Image (spheres, helix red, strand yellow):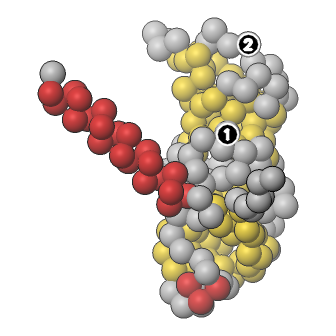
Amino acid sequence: DTVYKQRYDYTEAQIIKNSWNHDNNYIMINKGSLHGIHPDMAVISPQGIVGVIVNTTRNFSTIMPILHRNSRNSVKIKRTGTTGSLIWKGHDSQHATVIDIPTTHKLYKNDTIITSGLANDFPEGIMIGYIEGLSSVPGSGFYEVNVRLATDFNKLEYVYVVDNHFKAEQDSLMQAALADIDGKEEAK
């Protein structure tokens, strides 16, 4: 008889400022620390992934959307479970790029890309988009995958801020593990 503890809570917020056509875009929402919002919380829309909270005041927060050159998110191919990283190269609010997928994995046009759940921020399975094309990066052994995003950033009005109740515990455990690995490396 175990007690189920809910892992995620969602807070709805309205977008009050939004940019999608710059190299480093930001979104502002009408919820802040007064509403339980804090940095590093994931943000999603009914269509899919949006970004991560970077700053808050009492009543407002800013989001670094996936349409930002410093954004990097853990993703996977839904059909195969193969993981990679989502990045944005700028200029096109409808497309992003998935990197770090080995060319030994078979990918197809229209394969679905979702969040992997490996980064302790986004729940697993949140829609990102569909493969439109891919090419192998010469000499690397990895694909560069062009993804058509499911979220239309030009039409966003409402989003959901995701509170992972276990994020601090998970992050702390990973930091301890990395410190242990670093300590063993230095001892060599």
Query: Label 2: how many residues lie within 10 Å, few (<14), some (14-19) or many (20+)?
Result: few
* Residue 67 shows in this picture: no
Q: Could you tell me which secondary element the residue under label 2 belongs to? A: loop
User: Which comes before the other along the chain, label 2 or label 1?
Assistant: 2
- Nearer to the camera, 99 or 76: 76
Vertical placement of residue 160 versus 147, above or below = below
Asked if marks 2 and 1 touch (Cβ < 8 Å), the reply is no
Please give left or right for residue 177 compared with residue 155 in the image. Answer: left
Q: Position of residue 84 (x, y in %)?
A: 60, 31
Mark 1 sits on what residue? Answer: 116
Vertical placement of residue 148 versus 82, above or below = below
- Nearer to the camera, 55 or 23: 55
Q: Quadrant of residue 184?
A: top left
What amino acid does circle 1 point to?
Ser
- Nearer to the camera, 7 or 66: 7
Residue at 59% x, 89% y is 34
Please give left or right for residue 103 compared with residue 151 in the image. Answer: left
Q: Position of residue 151 (x, y in %)?
A: 78, 55
Q: Position of residue 4 (x, y in %)?
A: 77, 58
Vertical placement of residue 135 versus 55, above or below = above
Vertical placement of residue 169 versus 184, above or below = below
Residue at 57% x, 36% y is 85
Query: Label 1: how many residues lie within 10 Å, few (<14), some (14-19) or many (20+)?
Result: many
Q: Nearer the viewer, mark 2 or mark 1?
A: 1
* Residue 125 shows in this picture: yes
Q: Position of residue 110 (x, y in %)?
A: 84, 29
Which mark identifies residue 106?
A: 2
What amino acid does circle 2 point to?
Lys
Residue at 65% x, 79% y is 29
Q: Could you tell me which secondary element the residue under label 1 belongs to? A: loop
Specify the quadrant that holds the C terminus.
top left
Q: Disc 2 and disc 1: Cα gap in Å? A: 18 Å
